Amino acid sequence: MNPSLHSRTRAVLPDWLALYYADPIELTHGEGRHVWDADGNKYLDFFGGILTTMTAHALPEVTKAVSEQAGRIIHSSTLYLNRPMVELAERVAQLSGIPDARVFFTTSGTEANDTALLLATAHRRSNQILAMRNSYHGRSFSAVGITGNKGWSPTSLSPLQTLYVHGGVRSRGPYAALSDADFIEACVADLRDVLGQTRGDVAALIAEPVQGVGGFTAPPDGLYARFRDVLQEHGILWIADEVQTGWGRTGEHFWGWQAHGRSGPPDILTFAKGIGNGMSIGGVVARAEVMNCLDANSISTFGGSPVTMAAGLANLSYLLEHDLQGNARRVGGLLIERLRAIAASASVVREVRGRGLMIGVELADRSPRVAAAVLENCRENGLLIGKGGGHDTSVLRIAPPLSLTVSEAEEGAAILERALRSVS
């Protein structure tokens, strides 16, 4: 750790900007699934810059694409035709599953969700939004206003009227003891009850198929399909926040919404994080009727940058050609089972849950102190993981690059096992 850099950080950046570890580390370079800090320590990366280095650190194909594009032109804005942006939009539109899809690129998941909320409220002429309890959708003013996780919602002020629905958390709350089928029925009844309390038209329901910051919680498959049936009765749009679940991370599906796809795709899909493999890319996919509803001029200065689009194209091609979704399913499945075996004899763990390489280890003790101790022990032994959870949970978040190998999964699980036993 560089004390000078730490003190300079605290002197010039906001106090509320969180840093991991008692002695924060400066990451200087990476390769594959590993990163190194300024002191030369090597770490197995099980968090990927908050699920963003999706494929691998310093992936040659992406590095080459970025370098070549930067050598031609770095920036132009959306006021000019942009070949890499159109090429990536064509691929994303086709992969989205949304018919007659249009794509708008942003620079982050927050901005993507902000845009989705703008589209939905303009299209429906309503500022009423349904959101899930325990949810997180970004840090902009409107995104904070619909976030159902008080640890990440610093103000109650909002341009939107938000009503919160049950269903995003399976193993806690008033319906936790029900069977999956009864859980879904109870949540659908709750949705109908909430709609009975609204005035006029509701714009949209926004939901993460797997809640990210909330601790990698998810409902039973099919819940959002049932919700969609109810929403369609009222003309309400469904926004799937795929910022953390997209691009095959869950292993079983390319998009998280596909676990709930019986009633069709969402009206709006937001994405970010992994598609750029570290470059700043976010975006919105919507059917043309919704995307084209705005009646004022709009552009993006940095969304769709030629350099970031080149990175996204190279990264998406690599992801598909090397079947990283399949690797997430196979290696992630082995890792989840290994962690569940550890949890069976570790009293500090309440639950291991997840899909593919999106795994949450919920701790029995919800004190942030315990999670921090586990993170510190992992770091000392060469493993970087994340943390999250709702207002009454503390969860270790595990989301390595999708190219993770079986031996690396075993190595990381062994380090985490020792860390968990150290706080038991």
Image (cartoon, helix red, strand yellow):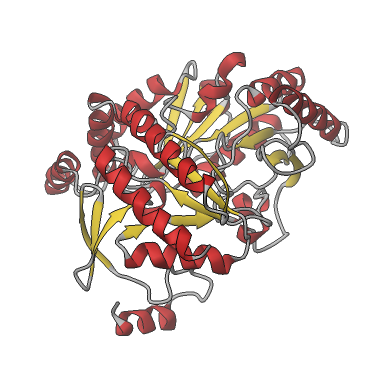
State the count of labels.
Answer: 0
Query: In the image, what residue occupies the spot 56% across and 32% down?
Result: 240
Query: Is residue 267 among what the camera can see?
Result: yes
Q: Is residue 49 shown left or right of residue 259?
A: left
Residue 102 found in image quarter: top left
Q: Is residue 191 shown left or right of residue 207?
A: right
Q: 76 or 179: nearer the eye?
A: 179
- 253 lies above or below 215: above
- 190 lies above or below 215: above
Residue 9 found in image quarter: bottom left
Query: In the image, what residue occupies the spot 38% across and 19% down?
Result: 94
Q: Is residue 128 shown left or right of residue 142?
A: right
Residue 403: percent from the left, percent from the top? 27, 38
Q: 380 or 195: nearer the eye?
A: 380
Residue 161: percent from the left, percent from the top? 76, 46
Query: In the image, what residue occupies the spot 70% across and 35% down?
Result: 167
Name the quarter where the N terminus is drawn.
Answer: bottom left
